[in-house]
Image (cartoon, coloured by chain):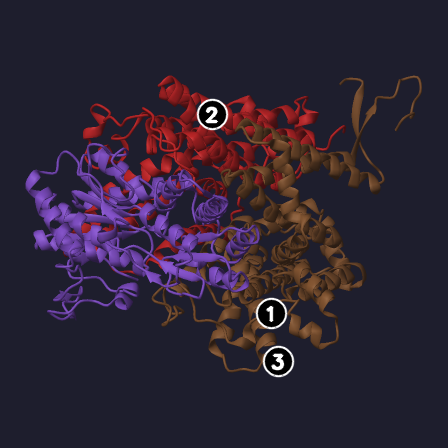
Chain colours: A red, B brown, C purple
Amino acid sequence: MDGFLPYLLIIIPALAAAVSTGTSILYATLGELVMERAGVLNLGVEGMMMVGCLASFLGCYHTGSPWFGLLCGGVAAMGMSAIHGAVCLFFQGSQVVSGLALTLFGVGVANYLGTPYIQQKVVGFASFNVPVLSSIPVLGPIFFQHDAMVYLSFFIPPLLWFLFMRTRYGLALRSTGENPEAVRAAGISPSAVRWSALMLGGFLVGMGGAYLALASMRMWVDNLVSGRGWIAVALVIFAFWRPGRAVFGVYLFTGVTAYLFRVQALGVGIPSSFLNMLPYLMTLAVLFASSLKGRGSGAPADLGNNLKPGS
Amino acid sequence: MSGWRIVSRTEPREWGSVVIFAVAFALSLLICALLLAVQGKDGLGGIGLLLSGGFGHLYSYGETLLKAIPIFLCSLGVALCFRLQVWNIGAEGQYVIGTLGGCWFALSFPGLPVWLMMPGMLASAMLAGGLWAAVAAVLRQRWGMNEIISTLMLNYIGIEILKHLIYGPWKDPAGMNFPVSPYFAESAIIGPVWNPDFWTGIGLSDGIVDTLAQLFGRAHWGILSCLIAGALCSFFLRKGMRGFEITAAGSNAKAARFAGIPYSRLVVLVMFVCGALAGLAGMQETSATLNRLEPHIVVGYGYTAVVVAWLAKLRTMRIAFFAFILAGLRVGVENLQLELQISSSFANTLEGIILITVLAGQFFNDYAIRRKPRQSVPGAGV
Amino acid sequence: MFKKTVFFLLGLMLMCNVAVAAEKEMKLGFVYVSPVGDAGWSYAHDLARQALAEQEGISAFYMESVPEGADSERVILNMARKGYDIIFTTSFGYMDPTIKVAKQFPKTTFLHCSGYKTADNVSNYFGRVYQPRYLTGMVAGKMTKSNQIGYVAAFPIPEVIRGINAFTLGVKAVNPDAQVRVVWTKTWYDPAMEKDAAISLLDIGVDVLAQHQDSPGPQEAAQDKGVYSIGYNTDMSKFAPNAHLVAAVWDWVPFYLDVVKQVREGTWKAGSFWPGLETGAVNISDFGAMVPQDVRDLVNARKQEIIDGKYVVFSGPVKDQNGQVRVEAGKVLSDQELLSMDWFVEGVIGSTK
């Protein structure tokens, strides 16, 4: 295995792994992106993913249908989103603390209620090759030899882009993130827009959790999410709140990790703490480079602020 | 609902806020009792175990205090940043890097006498933590980089640096290749407050020393740094010029700039202070409890600090209160876990529920729900 | 008659006393570093705890997910304060806290797993799991067709390195051409990530996967991709019925029962215990159906040799990765050298840094 070639050849399986391991983070990142675009900062992604993960597992476990499980996961995470909405949109609580609390609660409650199901298996989503497309060289193995949830995830970013840029609802959603008072002046309730974004985003985050239980592991074990929710939060900012960049960011992040595993497998003795640091350093570097170019980060202006009640 | 509306309180509640906190707290405990009952455990008994574990014995307080020290210090710094609207969630990384700075000093100069070692070690920890935090501040002010992501990324990087050092150059040659540093010299170990020899030495009777010993338990001299840091913080925020500037700039950065307040320099300053406090917390914890560097010093105090700062509404005394309460709950829930033999994830669940209800409860501090005034009586009931 | 009755009664009372002493309720505490649901290290200890708790006169409690460091000292302290008779602390990071608490509670018995310190009332213990590791290596060496075997490993600490080395020696004993490729995940427990680390090895052409992780992630990968796997900690065949060849497993019950018995009888003495295959504390699981009979016979024969002391796993000549002789022919590694191992044997592809 000497020479340069093996290091090139493993790029294709590494990218394929980036797509499959990235899918759960991708759903979560897009979900968080929707919420933040409407001005709601939700640091509870980790907990929401855990709850979605357990709910999807239970749904599939009891009915045998992965699609029903997926639905359960999404709806359960929507429920978590609703707690965030109640605390922040209704009770005017801090979005940062509510999110952190949601993470604590979600991770805890999912592991707690999941205890009796540990090591139980479910049917889950099996991988299948997409006819024709999977036989394209390079692109085929990277994108078209996965499971249904991966293929589904390819449609979400363009749909979100369309929603944001080409629909009136999208305009209202973006404006609520920038200037809720202006939205109110236009006769739309910013609170209602934020609630809807929380529900939509919550469902997507729940799908991210569901991927881990239904496609990745196809069983229940403790703490399946293991920090992926936090990575999703970071990636939203890395993506400058744009769905397309989010896809790039997710695959870059998981791709680096996947590639480094394969470099290790080839037997390169690079100190691995530096390698482990690389994804975070790269995120910082990319952000820094964009800042140098003088482009703003594009953060929604009203992100993290609560709507004033009664005004 | 149409007959009611939400209005801002012009005056904050005083004692009312205590009642609201107590009600929210009790409510969350009830929810937890229900969750226990779901798995067939004695719910109310469990809550009793929780409270007695955290606050029920003399020795509980020492343990709670010990755990509250790093939370308080980190939270104090985080609160300073939040006052300036700088969303620093990097106390975790600053805690780690500060510890590394302190450990570097303690391991490099083991022969120093205690009066040189202690200040040197702690100053080195504060400097390292402070500089690490200042990186994010400079990135934000100079290049407009979002501090939430930069501090979050710096947390991960800090932890990786710790791992690198402890699995590599700092590994104790006598430690059987386990990831631990050599033990610190005696002069670099922060002792417990209750060291009986010291107290009987200054003439206290055995009975009192014994009680003190139980009460303080493993709590170490780091308490002193909490008192000093807390006092300095609240003094400068009230009386100092910088404190005034921080308050002013926090409420309106643009206006502050017009008023000639050096906003950027202030941001770097508060971030440095926050990092220094977090670094101090980390080094004290490491020196007092583990006596050497181990990878397990990172347990999430930096994130807890964010929660505490918010719950306390950035006020120093309240930070102390909430740090103590949260630490007590974490200590107490272990008692509950052991006695009822339930999954450790219950601890997280409990903390999450308490935070959510207390947070929602704070609504009643700031707002009131009033009946809408009738058209015919303008101004009534406002 | 009267005398007889008195003697009889006295005898009865004495017997009762003895019976009471023998049946003294023993309260055991177990401190785990991870949740018991991890299917790995803590799970193996907890299986033993549950078996012990079913015995007459023993109650056994646990605390899971206890962080190493300052928090663990409080948990151990709490157990000691509550009057537990024996406290088992089952992770390396609990070593110093255990020693500290033991000093304050001289009447309590402490057992620390996987460290090296002892005190008057603290033993340390571990199992020679490298012996079954060696045996599973033999199975892997026989079953591989590509001569590339993958090993998903957690952290480069002596325990893990020792296991990889023993495994590789087992592989080499039956298949000198095979190589063992190591990928570090730097996690003990992240099922999805560990699964991907395993897949990365499959991409390189590995056809048997071994693991030193607490999650069944690598087993899942093997099952999905139709290659063989070697389990660890407990029999993992339920996760990968078509892939699981054999596993190196822990069975703490006999060792723990022995400790309880000795403490109850007052004969317990602190020391370092490192039981091997001969005690049953470590073992190999049942073979998967795909392991042919001749391989089973070969492995079982070697197992018997180890039990009888006729074969020692780390016996020379052993070379390291650079071809340098680390153990001379005719010599064996001391326990001290095993405990602090930080180099790979020849045949391992990977780095210990």
Query: Which element is circle 3 on?
Result: helix
**Percent coordinates x, y for residue A189 in the rendering:** 66, 23
Distance from label 1 to label 3 (Cα)?
Answer: 14 Å
Residue B12 visible? The answer is no
Q: Quadrant of residue C58?
A: top left
* Callout 3 amino acid: Trp
Distance from label 3 to label 2 (Cα)?
Answer: 59 Å
Tell if the residue under mark 2 belongs to the same chain as the one under mark 1: no
- In this view, the mark in front (3 or 2): 3
Which residue position holds label 3? B115
Q: Taking B116 as reference, is C271 left or right?
A: left
Q: Is residue A205 above or below residue B276?
A: above
Judged from this view, the residue extending furthest toward the left is C294
Q: Residue A74, labelled with which disc?
A: 2
Subunit under mark 1: B
Which residue position holds label 1? B191
Lower position in the chain sequence, tag 1 or tag 3? 3
**Percent coordinates x, y for residue C153 in the rendering:** 29, 51
